[in-house]
Image (cartoon, rainbow, N blue to C red):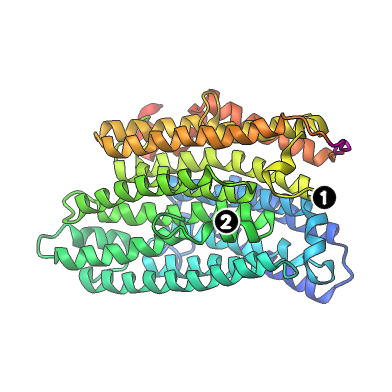
Amino acid sequence: MSVFSVEIFLVVFGLALLCLEAFVPTLNRRTLAGISIGGVALAFILFVFASKSATDLPAFVQPYHQLDTLAVFYKGFALVITLLVLWLTVESSAYLTKFTPGGNYSELFSLPIFVCVGMMWMASAKDLITVFVSLELVTVSFYVLVAFARKSNLALEAGVKYLILGALSTGVLVYGIAWIYGVTGALSFEGIGAALALPATSKSAALLAAAFLLSGLAFKVAAAPFQMWVPDVYQGAPIPVTAFLSVGSKAAGFVVLTRTVEAFVVKGSIIASEVQGLLIVGGALTILLGSLPAIFQTSVKRLLAYSSISHAGYLLLALGAGSARFDLNPGGVVAFYLATYLPMTVLGFLVLAVLRAHGGGEDLQDFRGLSKRSPLLALAMTLALASLAGLPLTAGFMGKLFVFTGLVDQAAWGALVCAVIGAATGFYYYFRAILVMYTSDSQKADLLKLSVGTKIGAAALAVVIVVIGVYPKPLQHLLMPATVSVVAH
């Protein structure tokens, strides 16, 4: 069985689930949730044992599909985050029932599967047409997911903003694709890289094409100056969708951005230095525009939104630095950072979902006294926020360490200063939230009763954060390019 067979299985499964929900309206939501989670879990198991060789792909797919180390990693990443989002949807059931017509949120168990398929196809895309089709599958699904809580004015506002700005960014992206085809005569990443290495290629036209293409992708990854949609959309969307946007959508955008940048900066490229400079400047600006406004946030969701912007900046710097360290190339460093970002972000949103399910709010003051109401949740949130800040011995520290090392290697001192400012600022607003949780609340509050699934999930995510922070070697080995991996053996 090839990896492509797993993707086709997910497409059929998602459609079947959608039809099941539509034609059997009496089906219990927990049953539907169990079927959904079970199907994606089965897909993950099949993916683990499926052939990872491109020669085993169907002949009609091979010209458009690649299965290198990054492609395999991001496909697995997509399956894992989808599983976690479906689980978060179950944990948020009490909150979702209040804000959906008739208390029906069944589509939240099928639409994430289509997003997962789009992310998996993007990871293997060899050309910009495949990228665009896969990206639209992801984006259109998110249009529906963001505005899904239709009884919430914030959700409807978030949906409209995301739709309008998303359509605008898609237009910019298509315009960039048209320009790059006009300049290079190619749509495949390999063909684009080969054309940009030719002295006869117009440099000014290539730079214009790259600017439009990178601008369209910058919106998808929430990079400055296209990050303005993030706080309002994150605040209005349902918590599982916000987590999916923060991790899944960002990963999807960065795998495409990695492929695009690799094509732009191939050896001999006429625009390599300009593209790397743009990434460095954009990354530094994104960190500042994400970190500094976060200081003034009182909503935990908006705080995590600005945090997401800041982390996008670090990922841009990893790509722009272009240095290979720790046996990882720039694309590997980006993938490593995203792998560390996943457990701490999902854990943070899990705590938020549990509080909402118990009648709490999303304001920072709603976390006051959490250590008394639920020591486990308070400890989990503390670990998640500490890792987001980059505290040593956590996964977040290792991700930032790799980025900082790359900047030092390239002597990008200005960007390094901005990254340090962002990290220092992060310690302030993350640990301010931790302090609130351990501050006594004058009002008496009942203890929070957590389900067994919540306890196991929170503990598992916490263990992953610590294990990666203490021993990142297995993850590094997983992301080594094939040639490096062979030498390492």
- Residue 245 badge: 2
Percent across and percent down for residue 447 are 87, 35
State the separation of the CA atoms marked 2 and 1.
Answer: 24 Å
Quarter residue 411 falls in: top left
Q: Mark 2 or 1 closer to N-term? A: 2
Q: Secondary structure at mark 2?
A: helix
Closer to the camera, 104 or 336? 104
Quick one: label 2, few (<14), some, or many (20+) residues within 10 Å? many
Quarter residue 124 falls in: bottom left
Tell me, yes or no, if residue 26 can be seen here: yes
Percent across and percent down for residue 163 are 54, 72
Percent across and percent down for residue 33 are 79, 57
Tell me, yes or no, if residue 51 can be seen here: no
Most extreme residue toward the bottom, as rendered?
Answer: 23
Task: Please report the bounds of the magenta region as a residue range.
Answer: 443-448
Between disc 2 and disc 1, the foreground one is: 1
